[in-house]
Image (spheres, rainbow, N blue to C red):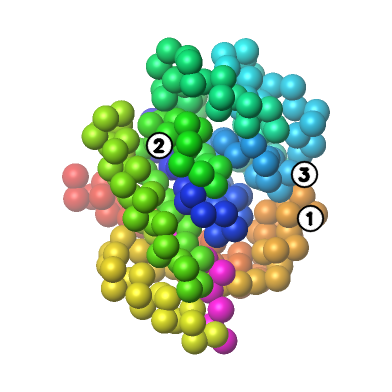
Amino acid sequence: MSRIIAVSNQKGGVGKTTTTINLATAMAACGSKVLIVDFDPQGNATTGFGIDKTKCEKNVYAVITEQCTVKEAIYHTDVPGLDIVPSTVHLSGGEIELVSAIAREYRLKNALAEVADVYDYVFVDCPPSLGLLTINALTAAQQVMVPLQTEFFAMEGISQLFRTIELVKRSLNPNLELMGVLLTMYDRRNNLSGLVEADVRGHLGRKVFNTVIPRNVRVSEAPSHGKPVLLYDVHCPGSRAYMSLAAEILKTKAEVRTAA
């Protein structure tokens, strides 16, 4: 059964897509079968794998508007064991189309049921908003990962996301839980990063991943080459951080399974 993880934060520029691409790649490198659902109309996760989204006639927009199935919209990446359902700019209009649809919050969940036994992990890259697309992702997911940039306004707005998660949990998806908060763009040369980290860990405790993602130029360069950073430069600090995060997630999963 797939573990569906929504990567979400309504604040833009915090590393959602970067995390989705590189964590999914790291999980695939560890032997998991992984699917990315690019659920952001900007389609950056799609282009991050060198896929031309303008040529993807079967995509996530077609899936949620029931023009095709998820299986028909899956594209293979250059990473063994890692597939993607690409996005398109039409997805922004899809959110409006869903407003009057029956069971509109369940479109993604119902679609992903088709591949529940195919993948170990499904990562949904959410848009920077708390609209109907994000609600669909939270309804489909078992867990939410929240990337949080280590800057001054890091905590601003996160309480709104947490309220949305609780609302979805109460009314649409009782199995939804916060997987963890991931600190991103961490700069050890900057005292502010350390202060923000201390503040976030003080407020959220064990809900913050031990791994932090450093600010790293190789991570920023990789998308322009249509590659995850692990293919672009496997030895850079960013690659090592995402491999560490994958190991942390797999270890936690193993501990939960042992406890059960």
For discs 2 and 1, the disc positioned in front in the rendered view = 2
Residue at figure coordinates x 48%, y 36% from the top left: 131
Amino acid at dot 1: Ser
Q: Is residue 149 above or below residue 29?
A: below
Residue 175 visible (yes or no): no
Query: Dot 3 lies on which element?
Result: loop
Magenta-span inclusion, residue 187: yes
Q: Residues within 10 Å of mark 3 (few under 14, many from 20)?
A: some
- Where residue 154 appears, x then y in whole percent? 45, 66
- Where residue 168 appears, x then y in whole percent? 32, 35
Q: Which residues are magenta?
A: 182-189
Residue 190 position by quadrant: bottom right
Residue at figure coordinates x 43%, y 12% from the top left: 102
Q: Residues within 10 Å of mark 1 (few under 14, many from 20)?
A: few
Residue 84 position by quadrant: top right
Q: Is residue 163 above or below residue 72?
A: below
Left or right for 197, reference 227? left
Location of the C terminus (image quadrant): top left
Q: Is residue 3 above or below residue 7?
A: above
Magenta-span inclusion, residue 143: no
Q: Which residue is mark 3?
A: 50
Amino acid at dot 2: Leu
Compare residues 28 and 215 and report the one nearer the observer.
215
Q: Which residue is mark 1?
A: 224
Query: Dot 1 lies on which element?
Result: helix
Q: Residues within 10 Å of mark 2 (few under 14, many from 20)?
A: many
Q: Which mark is residue 138?
A: 2
Residue at figure coordinates x 27%, y 54% from the top left: 255
